Amino acid sequence: MEKSAVYHLGDSIYSFPVSPTKARIRLRTKRDDTIKQVNVIWNTQHKFWAERLSTPMEIKYTDSMFDYYQADLDNGMPGYTYLFEIIETDGSVWYYNESGFDSKIYLTTTFEDNFMVVFPNENDVVYPNKAFDGRIFYQIFPERFARGEHSTIDKSYITMDWNTEEPRNDQFAGGDLVGITEKLPYLKKMGIGAIYLNPIHPSISAHKYDIDDYFDVDKMFGSLADLKTLVDTAHSMDIKIVMDLVFNHSSYYNPIFQDVVKNGKNSKYYDWYFVYGDKPVYEKCNYNTFCEVPMMPKLNTNNPKVQQYLASVGEFYARDYGVDGFRLDVAFDVSHDFWRYFRKKLLAINPDIYIVGEFWQNSHSFLGADQWDSTMNYPLQYGCKRYLVSNRYNASQLADFLNGALMRYKDATNQNMLNLLDSHDTPRFFTMVGENEKLYLMGIAILMFYKGSPMIYYGTEILMNGEQDPYNRKCMRWDSPMYNSDEHKVILHLLNLRANSDVLKYGEISVYSKDDLFYIKRTLDGQSITLAVNNSAESKLVSGISYGYNTDGNVMLPKSFTIIK
């Protein structure tokens, strides 16, 4: 056994409560090590010396370097003391605890040596968000999705043709909230259960990430009344609405920042930003910004007054307009202290509020029960790109990577994840795969089978293309010939399958490879459904196919996927 590879940490993703009495325990070991069996030796703190329970652990996930064992402890009592019994193939037995390895258990010093599951206070347990669990998300860039046929907005501001292939962030095509409301039946028919809206606040840009007024809707999109109509109509169809909130920075033209520009250190808002000098100077950019863009000065979310102001924004839309959740832009640059404050304020209004932060890497520090429910799961996109686009990964390497990604978080957090292949911040996935329909559909199949909530960017269903911003923000092609294509039918089948399968929504996940095929198996209450993906150059024989794409009987042709029930 490679002892240096063995790892466990109490009160972490390796040891956490999943209910008021049940604890989930994980242990990492070297992959394919000389280990025959791992057991957790445990009991409540004051009983351990007299009686020790033994629970076998099973390998739950495997990546390129490690095996991850898992077991649940539950005897109806909150809080446990435990250590690990590791039995090697040659019969050697080791006990691993906080003090390291030993050949025996020292009962008189278990309080010093053992790991501990602390009392599982209900507020600290991470649960799947019951209001959003299992829903398919659809991301909408409001300016480019749909012009409302019954909109009364003066459209004289339009400066961009709807069908242009050269969209710009300083030009406007006329999408609005009424247009989104009118398209809700279209989304419902596809199985969409939640909509993520990019920002809708007043701003000089088409993307609206430079906000002038947090408490209003840009007049190009409509009014607060139009937002209320959208939310109420969506709710009548059992569709949730998630708004984009930008709390890392405001617009240069926001009246709060303009007060600082005018009055400098005499402004009551001076310490709401990070200004170096008497007052902000645009040309010098002597203030912190988002990505060194002078138009987007960074807010000081360490300031209690800023925290109160920004939290009141979320309260306003959750309380007065019934918005169900918020996606938080550049959330990784905002203080943990603020997110804890924000969550408490929002939970007081809606205990099922959904809070998803933007972070492109491991987001563990934000994803306890006290800050975010979820993050945008870009690592899933990374894995799919490396498997389907760059060929950096084969099937085995993709399985290893995704298993490692699942081990970054607690199980309920994985269930809350917002999974995606593309967004307004990346090239469209159809462009990433070189507009190869087979690779594209294989990626969407993986998205629909992976644990968490799948999200598709508007136009995914009709294979819209587009390079990096601004080309990924073209207007929705409502007249696309792809609506009559076989590829569109496959996407609708996958969406329908995901929307109507409890196994795919809530089931346990197993990710693995075999014979150069990539597999995701989901299991719930004795039922299972498995996705097999063939990205190799060879045909593969697979039995039990219930649905196949690019298959010939039981033969998976190169660049294909099958569903096995």
Image (tube, rainbow, N blue to C red):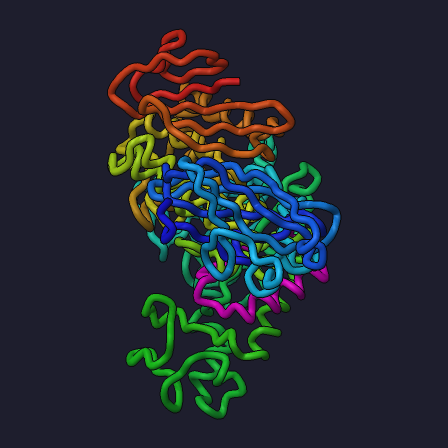
Residue 302 placement, left or right of 55: left
**Residue 133 in view here:** yes
- Position in image of residue 431 (x %, y %): 30, 37
**Residue 474 in view here:** no
> How many discs mark residues in the rendered view?
0
- Position in image of residue 292 (x %, y %): 32, 70
Height in image: 229 above or below 503? below
Q: Residue at x 48, y 51 (%)?
A: 103
Q: Residue at x 37, y 28 (%)?
A: 513
Q: Residue at x 33, y 81 (%)?
A: 286
Most foreground residue, 219 or 46: 46
Q: Is residue 2 magenta?
A: no
Most foreground residue, 335 or 155: 335
Q: Quadrant of residue 110?
A: bottom right
The quadrant of the rendering that contains the N terminus is top left
- Position in image of residue 359 (x %, y %): 43, 56
Q: Quadrant of residue 240?
A: top right
Most foreground residue, 399 or 94: 94
Residue 281 placement, left or right of 306: left
Height in image: 13 above or below 447? below
- Position in image of residue 419 (x %, y %): 47, 42
In the rendered image, the residue lying farthest to the top is 553
Q: Residue at x 39, y 91 (%)?
A: 278
Q: Which residues are magenta?
A: 322-349
Most foreground residue, 525 or 319: 525
